Image (cartoon, rainbow, N blue to C red):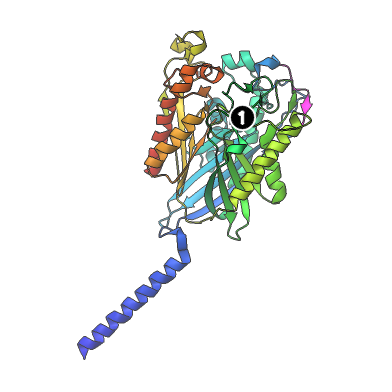
Amino acid sequence: MIIIRCLKAQILIAGFLIIAVFICTARTGAEGPYPWELHAGTGVADMTPDVYKMKIPLNGYGERHKTPAGGVHDRLCTKALAITSISPGGTREDAVIVTTDLCMVTEALREAVLGRIEPLGYNDDNLFLTATHTHSGPAAIDIRLPVEIAMGKFNPELFEFTADRIAAAVKKAAKSMVPVRADMVQGSFPNLVRNRREDKYDYATRRFVGEPSKNIDPLMSVLVVSGHNKKPVAILVVFGSHPTILGPDNLLISADWPGSLTKTLEARMPGLVAMFANGAEGDQAPPSMDAKDDFEWADKYGRAVADTAAKLAKHASPRGNLKLSSAVIRNRLPRMRLRSFLGIVIPRIFTKSIARDAIGSALVLGDAAFLGLPGEPLHRVGIELRERAKRKGVGKPVAVGLTNDWIGYLADPESYSEGGYEANMTLFGPREADLCLRTTLEALDKALKK
């Protein structure tokens, strides 16, 4: 009898264990056995400078000859997505992704922002700061002499204003944290972009003639962050395409087509914060469209990208158990090598006037990873970065250009040898892109080990 009773007890215990496992599995579903608690918050700040108070040249085109902006067509914004994941044991990881309607961000600007947000728990490893790359945003916030010569004398008041605005967005995001779920979805959309190194592209008019003849990187990545009521609270779109629809003849402040993209998404979903970060846009540009002027073209193209992003976002299956980790790595750059001047090598004392280090950045969220490069990668560089990341086990890698610094273009060796504008603007020689790739992948390794 005792043996029989023991067997019955063991059967009952086993049954309870099976039921418990089934309940836990049903509750978590695709979320798996690691219930990381995920929180996020958003913050938005207007960063449009007062062009009537200060004479502010626009960035991106030397052809403007530092002519001050004459007005504002549309407002510029900086937006922050603060993310926190907490492990079952209470371990906390924080990071913040910040997008800015600027042509570029610099390490000096990033340091100024960090000084303002460090009390919130943000540091060099977890600030992911990017620029949309609008060529109709303010210049004069870059203290580096070569940039001053090309784009306008450094304006300390404007610099401090810009850093304050970025920090304000981060502070708002940190104060609005709520439990969320998130998912990254990706798709290929070759109709939305063309390679501007084609012979049929006119850099002056920014328009194409004829059919495409060169390869591109048409990948779009969309991060969807939703509340537990399944209502999206933030969407981050990453796509590689130059915001150069507005040309050097434009003297009005504008976010170019990324402004239209984010406004379209936010109008469709009230309460949503829509963000845009540029991808491997170095040799990519919007296709030509019929429009009465460049502003209409920018609006039409922005809405086309928004339509695509909205459809892609519907395929997201947000989860709440995603682990977060991030890291930044620096490696010393070689001396500058100006290809357009027969490969002349610049002494290091002058090289430092642009940059001392290549900054690689990685932010991992579940099976996705944002991989930041400190300049304008050509499409082959973005593809190579994703392929290397996949070999490290990352399911959805995203190449993000213009992240945490700007050191010029990042041309792959083949494009560098071909020459042209993008090759000549790759300032640190034919191996610069590979150095930046390796640095970013080192950052990814560091993040994955956390």
Task: Evaluate whether residue 175 shows in this view.
Answer: no
Image quarter of residue 88: bottom left
The quarter of the picture where the C terminus appears is top left
Q: Nearer the viewer, residue 134 or 92?
A: 134
- Residue 194 image offset from top left, x and y in percent: 59, 31
Q: Is residue 145 above or below residue 397?
A: above
Q: Judge from the rendering whether residue 17 lies leftward or rightward of residue 127; answer left or right.
A: left
The correct choice, above or below, for 307 with respect to 294 in the image is below
Say which residue appears at 59% left-offset and 21% top-offset. 199
Q: Secondary structure at mark 1?
A: loop
Image quadrant assignment for residue 245: top right
Three-letter code, disc 1: Glu
Image position of 199 (left or right of 34)? right
Question: Does 34 sit above or below residue 398?
Answer: below
Q: Nearer the viewer, residue 142 or 198?
A: 198
Q: Which residues are magenta?
A: 67-74
> Which residue carries the number 1 mark?
211
